[in-house]
Image: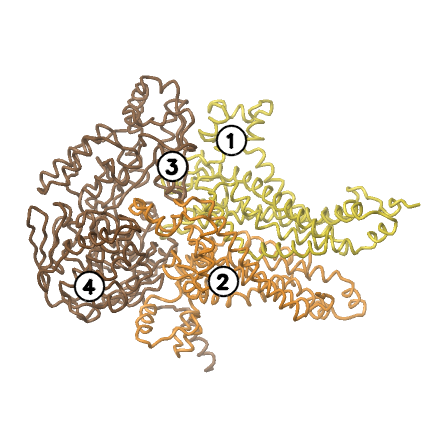
Chain colours: A yellow, B orange, C brown
Amino acid sequence: MAEATLLKPRRESFWRSRAWRRFRRNPLAIVGTLIVLFFMLVAIFAPALTADRMGRSCLRDLGVKRTEAVRVLRNPLSPKFWQATLHPPASCYKIPRKGYSPIPKHPSKKYPLGLSGGGYDILYGLIWGARSAFYVGILVIGVALLIGILIGGLTGYLGGWVDHALMRFTDAVYAFPGLVLVMVAVTIFGRSLTTIMLAIAIVSWPTYARMLRGNILKVKAQDFVDAARALGAGPLRIFFKHVLPNAIGPLIILASLDIGSIVLSVAALSFLGLGPEIGFADWGQMVNFARNWIVGPPGEPLKYWYTWVWPGLAIALFVLGWNLLGDAVRDALDPRS
Amino acid sequence: MLVYAIRRVLQLPIVLFVVSVVIVGLLQFLPPTARAAAYVKSEQQLAHIDEIIKQYNLDAPFYVQYWTWLKNALKGNLGFSRVDKKPVLEAIATRLPVSAELVLYAFLPTLLFSIWLGTLAAIHRDRFLDQLIRVLAVVFWSLPTFVLGIALVAVVYGYLKLFGIGRLPPDLIIQLAQQANAGEFRYYTGLLSLDGLLNGRLDVTLAALKHLVLPTITLILVLGAQIVRVMRSSMLDELGKDYVRTARAKGLPEKVVHYKHARRNALIPVITLAGLMFAFMLNGVVITETIFNLPGLGQWAAAAAVQLDQPSILGFALFTALIVALANIAVDVLYALVDPRIRYE
Amino acid sequence: MRRKIGILATLSLLLGVALAAVPKDTYVYMTFGDIDTLDPAQAYDTASLHIIENVYETLYTYKKDSLTEYEPLLATSYEIKDGGKTYIFHLRKGVQFHSGNPMTCRDAEYSFERILVTNPGDGPGWFFAESLIGYDSNAKSALGENASQEAYDQYWELIDKSVECDDLYTLRFTLVKPDPSFFAKLLYAGAAIIDSKWAIQNGEWSGTKKDWLDWAGKDLRQGFLHKNMSGTGPYKLVKWDGENVVAEAFDKYWGEKPKIKRVLVQIVKEQATRLEALKRGDADRVTVNDWATVESQVRGLPGVKVWSDPNWAPAGAGVIFFNFKVEGEDNPYIGKNTPRDLFSDLNVRRAFAHLVDQEALIEEIFLGHGVKLTMALPPSFLGYDPTIPIYEFDPDKAEAYFKKAFGGKLWDEGFEITITYNQGNTFRQTIAEMLKANVEAINPKFRVNVRGLQWPDYLRSARNKLLPIWPLGWIADYADPDNFIHPFYHSKGALAKRQNLKIPELDRLIEEARATVDPEKRAEIYKKIGRLAHDLAVNVPLPSQSPFIVTRDNLKGVYYNPMRSGTFLWKDIYKE
């Protein structure tokens, strides 16, 4: 006897699981998935998509001449293609400018989405903005999860006074006016994307820590844990083999669905003048920069609509996609409906 | 229960201490010349930056600076706000009523509005109404607040010529300033809508309300969007619970099931949210106050952080930490009152 | 029925439909600049001085929009004696302060001594102090906190003797040496006569030797005069509460009573909001960010007028600075293999000068409303020489100069530098990016990065002389060329210091100009300075944007005086 395997539920194959079937049947879930997939593709293939409108610095840093840019960057056989796709230089995130006029220019053949105030190519900004949206989202959630799991796991495992102390610490960070901390950190350490990401991550982890702790407590109270203990499994084994996997799973899934909303925090920072600098390919930055052009001249109030509608739409769709995906995943995993 | 609450309240000073140390500590990462940013605003002043550093003791070590600040803070002097050009406590006292008034008028409508929509969405789950509400919620949530705000200013205030910006129209501002000087108008609370009534000036109250319409709508839309989603998912949780199935099995009409049972229990996470709405509000408030020109705490925080005005940042951070911590305590207490299964030791 | 009407009435009151715009005797100005302080001895920014110039008055002032014609204000006449070392002003009689106290010489003496005594580091006192007592900082900064009693007493003696009252209405200034810019300095809005009795009563400096040292270098923002004003001007302050300044006409004003009786200055940060208020008529004048907005959103608005004139020129100048010797060990703004004295070579400077496309800047950014500058001096100032050539945009010439630089080595080895600008300033950002594009196009070995610095970073880097090249501007304190020439071209000048600029011939000329009293002779010297600066390409002057004023079209009497913080005085305007 004594084998815990007797109590392990038989794992259903994923493709035949109830969760997947529920997910598949939900039309909004499909829509959400498609949207996120779309942005993912745009982000991944950003260099190839914008090869014909890349800025001089980006080309220079990639070592590609303008005349061969389209040919090289759209050719999966070329090493430059992979370099650009996997690890593009920072200068590629700067939106190229056509002229310097502060007045936006209407969409044209060469610039199908128009030029924002300052001559910034909106199409380029939108495409590379998808990249930075993922980049920032993933990094922020990643770091926040790491810290949150560490702390939440410790409290869940050790319990007692450690639990108390860490929870009070978590509360303190939670109570901390996060926006202020982010603002101060960015003002001090600079408006680089790294600082912004770290700052947002540092104020976001308490939610995950608490969630993990809550999950751990719930799982610990379940029958199969008692059974494992009755069969003689040690506390460490119980924790890492039974409790943690069941507790972390939902946490990671739910956390990853927050990726879509990080883009909003960065947009808020841009409004305060603390976001990435003007000209950086970030949707929030682009909308913020367009804010003096939301209202146009008398008689043509929406004359410069393209400066804020495109990036605004990108943000809205991105967040919507993640949201629909998130809700659908949550619903699918829900054993009670 | 009472003991628990008191214990939590007594732990507040620790939170405040940590907050203050962190901020002062963070600011030390900057060299004195950079920290002088709060005091040097122009090229001309930059020429004298060394004097300024000495004058404000910006090159003293961390613990000296913190200790000086702490000594003063315990005496009730939170320093001088460079952003507002007045003592920090005075700045808070002046700005708090402005934000409070806005939040007050936005809070209840937001809560009620989102509870209603969230419930609606949950009840009609996966049908058209639910999908519509969810999509709209996301759109309003993801719309950068300032776009909504500016659109409202342009369309409603500019084009339709309704309502107003700032707290009062220009001639009332002038009139009240003159009358306040002469002692004919007293600012009892700082909440203009209330002070108008207390002074017997209905026109002031009406004007204040008129000017609050647009910012309140903005806040309601942006905050409500977030809360609708939470209400919906918590309502869904409840509707899936056993007792609901039992009630249905008993033959109780759907309406009773929804409103009498499920909704009451779905309120628990809403209490959390209501308590946390203060924290959420901060983002929305900062932007709303800037666009509609309301001199509240949000606007102050934004300016202070960007200009590295240490006393103001500290004052604001401590104040908010206090409020959020108190709100958390209130929330936990409310939980215990609402859900008899929750017990604290 | 009655309930319905009641609701309707309330509704319409609430909706405020058909509410009149601002009344005719009221002037509402919405701007975005924060007011720092209302104390004339501390204020050093446009927003604060705008209020001060309307509530307080100086001895003499500019006549309407002229920079060269003056009219007596609180003084009726003056004489200069001792070759420019003594100035005697005869004060106007029968002038009352807002508090009711009569103005006498004692108030004038107090006002100027107060400026010299307090002279906070971030205030304007330095340029009075340098003329009147020979120090430019206050006693505690100049002598240290622990100087001897004797040293302090000596300092006090200097202050005391520099400003005296010969009698109740005669004010005498004694300078340490002749200063041809002194009269212009007295026109600075902060050189105002304040109500000494009222100030002393309310806790300000007693005006005597007793407590002067306590006030040396004090931050006046915590004092009484920070938000209370008692001046002689046509308007008195009603209230300043952070974002609103309310003022009303002073009924006992000594001069012509203004037509505008009530003034509201409001800080509104968001431009979109300001413009909507202007359209609605809730504001009579608003600040608009730039010509781009004016041309695309403001022109043609019903009820709105855009005032501008190609002859208007701002009292400011901007240049691109070159750092002759970049300092700092771990300097991120210059490449490791790039010579720190890159810009000490005249060829390099000339090359860069030829790569600044002044025409493009004016056309694209200022939409044609701009003027090129020949030197770092506003065109309307004494000594400006419009005939000095300007480096034209010429990539070929630039290439030729680069090839000659450092004996030809630079062309082969290349360099890497970072042009910095303060974040948020799109004009400077554009200049930086334009220069980057033009320089890099010449030789791939020339790498130019562009970086936006936040204000704290900028302060630190500028003071430590880390920046190799950066655009910057300066607005006049007083209408005298020395206010520009010294900071920009003298080796000890506030701005030139950061460039490690040291050209003895320039220093000599500047000091000579300072000592020359005859304006024509001075002008000649300044022209020489401008020409020398051009030949040596010490810096690259940038074009100036033509100013504009945006108001409702029923506002009359508007004019543009670049030395006025508010471009015109409230007492000169009226509404139809």
- Mark 4: give few (<14), some (14-19) or many (20+) Cα within 10 Å: many
Instruction: Using the image, determine if residue C373 lies above or below residue A295.
Output: above
Instruction: Using the image, determine if residue C111 lies above or below residue C318.
Output: below
Same-subunit check for callouts 2 and 4: no
Q: Give the amino acid type for the residue marked by disc 4 in the picture.
A: Gly
Element on which disc 2 rests: helix
Task: Specify the label residue A89 is tagged with.
Answer: 1
Q: Chain of mark 1?
A: A
Write the residue at 44% across / 74% down. Answer: B194
Cβ–Cβ below 8 Å for labels 2 and 4? no
In the rendered image, the quadrant that contains the N terminus of chain A is top right
Q: Chain of mark 3?
A: C
**CA distance separating discs 2 and 4:** 43 Å
Residue position for label 4: C233
Q: Nearer the viewer, mark 2 or mark 1?
A: 1
Q: Chain of mark 2?
A: B
Task: Specify the label residue B108 is tagged with.
Answer: none
Write the residue at 42% across / 39% down. Answer: A115
Q: Give the amino acid type for the residue marked by disc 2 in the picture.
A: Ile
Residue position for label 3: C420
**CA distance separating discs 3 and 2:** 41 Å
Instruction: Using the image, determine if residue C129 lies above or below residue A115.
Output: below
